[in-house]
């Protein structure tokens, strides 16, 4: 039917295209891969980034430190035993030691007095005789004796009451000593007569010793009375005069080697074991997980002792290999259980079912789909396993079952330093601080990686 009104009929102009403003569609955020997005979130976590820098610094300290600080960690400097950082290093050149015949060169009015200037070669003392004394006992201490308290270490006793001189050559250092001479009666009992003297020996070595130890250039003339400097030890020395900085560097190699190699091995085994159990499922999964529960219940310390016996590691020998074997054999179940739980979730995803319909084999499904989708959990587990292994090594070395002296390790150094912590605290503080910093850095880095690799957090943003 044709309309009778020609004004309502459409024309060609009615079919012209409309002018529409052309606009480009812009994404609200750039397209990022999973790992790129995880790195951005990790960088936003300041604690994790600082921890990452600390871990890198520790690795550089371990690997490059010994190349820069070329000091033998086992070399002993007996003139600088238990020296604190920043201690005085000046030493005076003296003539070689000669036996004392009893002569004196120093005047004095005290009952107990020095006969010669005191130095680290010898402290020579004389005192006035006490009527009725049959002998004298000499004590030495590093703190002044108070009333009613012990007088210190009894270092000598004269044979007669007429012998009123003594020469001390027992491990002298440039520090203050407090000497006490006590008169004894014929029965060997103290008579109540005490004479006290405080002495600070001057650090000295002979010219020949200075030459042999390279404390001065060969062309520089050396004379008695000149002063030279001992070798520098930035972090001091231990109780055997060994450089603390060199021992911390080489000890880091042992501690970090055990702390990194052992977790890599038992995490890798745990990943393979948990992946197999989660993928196979059913009765096989139950049997494998019950075995993992059995391994968790095994006592680590007992097996460490058994492995040391099996490997023929005797007392005083380093048990690095038994320690690694014990960690690998007893620490994998935790990783296996985490990976198994992830595999049980991933295997029900649609893309895994599609791959099965296309004929994908088991190895392909596990290696191509399941393990890559659990890689975040694996990395976080590895990051938390490293400080745990470092702490385990430090604990075993501390109780004498790990790395044995003279091989340095942070735990062994802490065990040595605790014996003199009240007098020389730096021997304990430095290895303990490094252990604490390392464990804390890896834990904070693990927290940051867990947050960065969590896909659920990405969906919440």
Image (cartoon, rainbow, N blue to C red):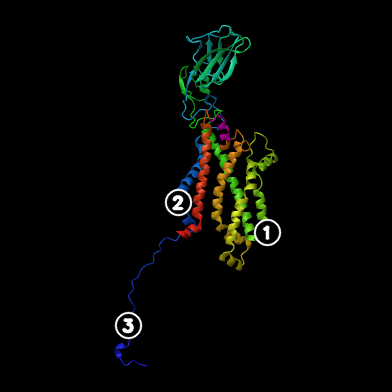
As rendered, which of 140 and 125 lies closer to the eye? 140
In this rendering, is residue 52 above or below 353? above
Task: Give the numbered dot on residue 284.
Answer: 1
Q: At 51% across and 32% down in the image, what residue appears?
A: 426
Residue 121 percent location from the top left of the image = 53, 18
Label annotation for residue 14: 3
Closer mark to the observer between disc 2 and disc 3:
2
Disc 2 from disc 1: Cα separation: 42 Å
Instruction: For marks 3 and 1, give the one nearer the viewer.
Output: 1
Few, some or many C-alpha atoms within 10 Å of disc 1 (few <14, some 14-19, many ≥20)? few
Residue 46: say if magenta: no
Q: Secondary structure at mark 2?
A: helix
Can you say which quadrant of the picture contains the N terminus?
bottom left
Is residue 226 among what the camera can see?
Answer: yes
Q: Earlier in the sequence, mark 3 or mark 1?
A: 3
Q: What is the x, y in percent for residue 412?
A: 58, 35
For the magenta stretch, what is the residue range?
Answer: 412-421
Q: Secondary structure at mark 1?
A: helix
């Amino acid at each position: 039917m044709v309309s009778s009104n020609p004004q309502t009929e459409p024309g060609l102009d009615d079919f012209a295209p409309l002018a529409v403003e052309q606009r480009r569609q812009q994404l609200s955020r750039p397209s990022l891969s999973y790992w790129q997005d995880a790195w951005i979130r990790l960088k936003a976590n300041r604690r994790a980034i600082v921890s990452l820098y600390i871990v890198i610094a520790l690795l550089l300290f371990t690997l490059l430190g010994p190349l820069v600080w070329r000091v033998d960690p086992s070399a002993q400097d007996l003139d600088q035993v238990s020296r604190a950082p920043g201690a005085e290093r000046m030493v005076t050149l003296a003539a070689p030691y000669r036996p004392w015949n009893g002569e004196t060169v120093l005047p004095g009015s005290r009952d107990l007095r020095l006969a010669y200037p005191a130095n680290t070669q010898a402290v020579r003392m004389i005192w006035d005789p006490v009527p009725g004394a049959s002998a004298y006992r000499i004590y030495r201490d590093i703190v002044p004796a108070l009333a009613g308290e012990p007088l210190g270490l009894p270092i000598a006793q004269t044979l007669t009451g007429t012998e009123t001189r003594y020469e001390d050559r027992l491990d002298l250092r440039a520090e203050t000593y407090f000497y006490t001479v006590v008169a004894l009666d014929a029965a060997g009992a103290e008579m109540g007569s005490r004479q006290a003297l405080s002495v600070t020996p001057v650090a000295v070595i002979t010219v020949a010793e200075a030459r042999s130890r390279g404390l001065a250039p060969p062309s520089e003339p050396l004379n008695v009375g000149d002063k030279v400097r001992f070798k520098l030890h930035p972090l001091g020395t231990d109780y055997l005069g060994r450089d603390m900085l060199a021992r911390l560097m080489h000890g880091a190699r042992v501690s970090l080697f055990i702390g990194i190699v052992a977790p890599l091995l038992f995490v890798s085994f745990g990943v393979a074991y948990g992946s197999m159990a989660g993928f196979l499922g059913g009765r096989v999964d139950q049997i494998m997980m019950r075995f993992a529960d059995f391994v968790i219940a095994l006592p680590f310390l007992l097996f460490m002792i058994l492995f040391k016996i099996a490997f023929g590691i005797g007392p005083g020998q380093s048990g690095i290999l038994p320690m690694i074997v014990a960690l690998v054999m007893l620490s994998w179940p935790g990783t296996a259980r985490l990976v198994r739980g992830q595999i049980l979730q991933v295997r029900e995803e649609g893309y895994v079912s599609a791959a099965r319909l296309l004929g994908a084999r088991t190895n392909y499904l596990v290696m191509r789909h399941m393990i890559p989708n659990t890689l975040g959990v694996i990395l976080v587990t590895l990051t938390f396993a490293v400080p745990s292994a470092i702490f385990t090594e430090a604990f075993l070395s501390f109780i004498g079952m790990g790395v044995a002296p003279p091989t340095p390790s942070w735990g062994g150094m802490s065990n040595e330093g605790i014996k003199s912590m009240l007098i020389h605290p730096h021997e304990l503080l430095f290895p303990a601080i490094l252990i604490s910093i390392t464990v804390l850095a890896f834990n904070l880095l693990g927290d940051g990686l867990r947050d960065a690799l969590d896909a659920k957090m990405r969906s919440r943003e």
